[in-house]
Amino acid sequence: MIRLPIWFACAGCGYQAPADRPVPLRCPQARPDDDIDHVMARVLDPARLTFPAGSEANPFIRYRTLSYGYHVALAAGWSDADYVSLIERLDAAVAGVDGGGFRVTPFARNAALSERLGFAHDGGVFVKDETGNVSGSHKGRHLMGTLIELEVAEALGGGSTARRRLAIASCGNAGLAAAVVARAAGRDLDVFIPPDAHPVVVARLNALGAHLTVCERDPRLPGDPTYHRLREAIAAGAIGFTSQGNENGFAIEGGLTLGYELAADLAAAGTSLDHLCLQVGGGALASACIGGLAEAHMLGATTADPKIHPVQAQAVAPLARAYERLAHRLDTDEPSDADIAWAARHRSAFMWPWESEPHSIATGILDDETYDWLAVVRGTLASHGGPVVVDEATLLEANEIATSTTGIDVDPTGSAGLAGLLELRRHGRVSSSETVAVIFTGIRRDVASDADMLGIRVGGTR
Ligand SMILES: [Zn+2]
């Protein structure tokens, strides 16, 4: 039995996936209501991996040696070229559906934005622009990562997943990206959506051939009704085609490319970041960036890590609440592995669904729970950063500043990380000589009508 340089273990209970059969997407030891935060997570052997230094335009090709499926395929006799051609075939199919395939996205200091926020020349704001990515956000990265793993397993005859339906709960960018990737692969996709899903999104999902199910909220049942239906579908045999890791351990892998790209660009520029502000809903974006940067650091690509600031809307901030609860329990700000293991086994002490339905202009981060909460809290504590909670006026101001200074047509959810930076600047927690990064992800639909719908007055001059 060959031990690969990457394997999977449950971050909640410690279950280790056997090396001689396909990795289960969900932890097989999970039991209903056991209060353990089961997530199948990657474990790396840094002695057997190097951080890729290639310059291929496609991130799944550039960082292929850090994907689990690559090592599975090579152990089964594939050549490097075989694996690359699989990705090229899938990427061409995505381009056929969406007009373009996956490419490493731009990341640079933005002079106008830095000046607007009062930064000095030695500090400033770096923007990673994901609005030009497949389907207009970073979400497709997670789903493409999962698709590659499924396709490798099926090609090797190790996974009988080919005819199983894919399923996701989303009425936004994750659902759209899932529909594009599923369509490209010729796979059936169920999308569970709320009754108030945006008509433009519904029309696009239908056009992409996704099977939609509208899920009404039951006031007696806490938690997101679309998420409940997703879990029922998974229990009935569907594959969780999500961006969060708890329903599919492979989901994080494609997202890690975001962190790898940040690390590689910073190293190439000979600089480092003091802070990274990340909008948090379900937690996939933050856990992906934190994980990618941590792996890059482990493999020697970077030497300094930014302070992590998860940003949530005042309307609903379960991650900030979980962070405060864990930080309060700790004697030090350096949590031990035992502290984290304890938290993973007492999920309900930290995370539970909202009690009443919130409203915000940043609709994409209004998740009932932060599903990937523990990875984000752990990364935030380890970095000596801290969560930020922002009000509606700040979310709107950030979006106006983002679009007017950078020209990037990002939506208010996608610029919510910048709202966190505005808040940190107001309170003197980020100085003018420090460097900060934000990720703009999610292309804007129509801010004015969203604001009208919520009875919010849009400030600014745009
Ligand atoms: Zn487990």
Image (cartoon, grey):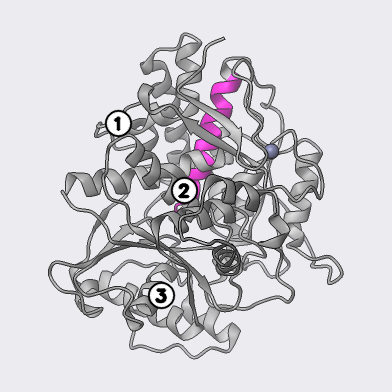
- Which of the 4 image quarters holds residue 159? top right
- Look at the numbered disc 1 and give the secondary structure of its residue: loop
Q: Is residue 146 magenta?
A: yes
Residue 242 showing in the rendered view: no
- Look at the numbered disc 2 and give the secondary structure of its residue: helix
Residue 160 in the image, given as x and y percentages of width and height: 69, 22
Q: Which residue is mark 2?
A: 288
Quadrant the N terminus occupies:
top right
Q: Does 132 sit left or right of 198 as displayed?
A: left
Other residues around mark 2 within 10 Å, as few (<14) / some (14–19) / many (≥20): many
What's the residue at 14%, 66% (across, down)? Answer: 122
Residue 274 in the image, given as x and y percentages of width and height: 28, 61
Please provide the residue range marked out in magenta: 137-154
Q: Is residue 353 magenta?
A: no
Identify the mark at residue 419; answer none if there is no mark: 3
In the rendered image of this protein, does residue 214 appear above or below residue 64?
below
What is the distance, in whole Å, between disc 2 and disc 1 at their CAs?
A: 18 Å
Q: Earlier in the sequence, mark 2 or mark 3?
A: 2
Q: Amino acid at mark 2?
A: Ala
What is the distance, in whole Å, between disc 2 and disc 3 at their CAs?
A: 20 Å
Quadrant the C terminus occupies:
bottom left
Residue 153 in the image, given as x and y percentages of width and height: 58, 22
Q: Earlier in the sequence, mark 2 or mark 1?
A: 1
Mark 2 touching mark 3, by CB under 8 A?
no
- Which of the 4 image quarters holds residue 54? top left
Q: Amino acid at mark 3?
A: Ala
Q: Does 449 sit left or right of 371 as displayed?
A: left
Q: Which residue is mark 1?
A: 52
Q: Residue furthest left?
A: 121
